[in-house]
Image (tube, rainbow, N blue to C red):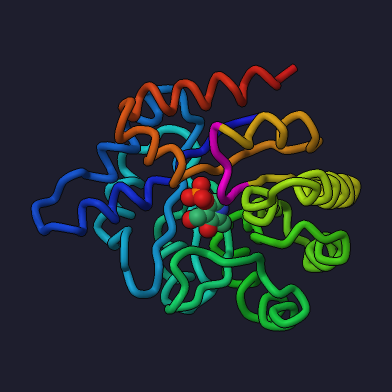
């Protein structure tokens, strides 16, 4: 199991002033030095955090896995095809949302992804992951689309309290099992942090890559990015083999 660090919010802080710091590209270098297996970024249509120049900078420096998260617009497909990341994670994107609010609505996107989005990314030879709700029916639709990877949305688990936590873990476990049974790689992310990561890892099988951003950046403000990333890498890697 691998940790990929989402560095979007380094750009959020950088964009609060126009002085170029902190630099998300430098943050990516530090994350990898601290043991992260790769870097995730989300180039949003409104460029509210990561900017185009960051994407090209990241492509130059990232030595491990590079995961390009994006909405399935023609503009993003073009940029992604040029960058050729290790993985393109497709997410729903709404202008008014603060962060990605849920997984893709699989029924709604199915035909468009089948006929327009996935063929273009296939032509560019970029493996695709779909960010999805942990629902068996959605895993089956992903299998029908032939995508090699899914990212299970862990946001509902991360926000759950009391009895709900167990229910969400059950939901994630079932979805991970169904995806794996269909030969799909299982990734996961959203809202994971130092408090909820262990119960997630204790309960969910087959997960290969975990993407964490906000919680690591928040922790890093007080303890430093190398310390925060190293600690999360150690937790996640302690579950390997
Ligand atoms: N995975 C996806 C698809 C996301 O949209 C995000 C948020 O940008 C994350 C993972 C990381 O979530 P968080 O910042 O809450 O760790």
Q: What segment carries the magenta color?
A: 189-194
Left or right side of 169 for 215: left
Tell me the quadrant of the picture where the C terminus can be found. Answer: top right
> In front: 74, or 29?
29
> In front: 70, or 17?
17
Q: In the image, is residue 126 above or below residue 141?
A: above
Q: Position of residue 136 (x, y in %)?
A: 87, 59
Give residue 26's quadrant in the image: top left
Residue lying at 51% horizontally and 71% vertically, measured from the top left: 71
Q: Position of residue 45 (x, y in %)?
A: 39, 74
Left or right side of 19 for 196: right
Residue lying at 67% horizontally and 56% vertically, measured from the top left: 156
Q: In the image, is residue 189 above or below residue 93?
A: above
Q: Main secondary structure of the magenta part?
A: loop
Q: How many marks?
A: 0
Residue projecting furthest to the left = 19
> In front: 94, or 113?
94
Q: Position of residue 226 (x, y in %)?
A: 35, 24
Q: In the image, is residue 50 above or below residue 200?
A: below
- Does any portion of residue 32 appear in the rendered image? yes
Residue lying at 76% horizontally and 29% vertically, measured from the top left: 202
Residue lying at 65% horizontally and 46% vertically, measured from the top left: 188
Left or right side of 150 for 184: right
- Does any portion of residue 179 appear in the rendered image? no
Residue projecting furthest to the front = 162
**191 within the magenta span:** yes
**50 within the magenta span:** no
Tell me the quadrant of the picture where the N terminus can be found. Answer: top right
Q: Position of residue 157 (x, y in %)?
A: 69, 50
């Amino acid at each position: 199991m691998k940790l990929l660090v989402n560095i979007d919010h380094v750009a959020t802080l950088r964009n609060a002033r126009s002085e170029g710091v902190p630099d998300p590209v430098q943050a990516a270098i530090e994350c990898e030095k601290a043991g992260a297996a790769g870097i995730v970024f989300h180039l949003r249509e409104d460029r509210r955090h990561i900017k185009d120049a960051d994407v090209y900078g990241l492509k130059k420096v990232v030595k491990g896995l590079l995961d390009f998260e994006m909405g399935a617009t023609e503009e993003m497909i073009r940029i992604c095809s040029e960058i050729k990341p290790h993985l393109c994670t497709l997410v729903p994107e709404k202008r008014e949302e603060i962060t990605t609010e849920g997984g893709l609505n699989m029924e709604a996107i199915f035909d468009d992804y089948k006929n327009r989005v996935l063929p273009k990314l296939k032509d560019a030879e970029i493996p695709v992951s779909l960010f999805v709700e942990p629902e068996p029916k959605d895993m089956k639709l992903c299998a029908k689309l032939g995508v090699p990877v899914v990212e299970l949305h862990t946001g509902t688990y991360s926000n759950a309290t009391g009895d709900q936590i167990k229910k969400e873990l059950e939901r994630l476990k079932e979805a991970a099992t169904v995806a794996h049974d269909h030969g799909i790689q299982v990734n996961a992310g959203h809202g994971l942090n130092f408090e909820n990561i262990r119960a997630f890892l204790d309960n969910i099988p087959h997960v290969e890559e975990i993407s964490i951003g906000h919680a690591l950046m928040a922790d890093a403000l007080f303890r430093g990015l190398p310390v925060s990333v190293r600690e999360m890498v150690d937790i996640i890697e302690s579950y390997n083999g």
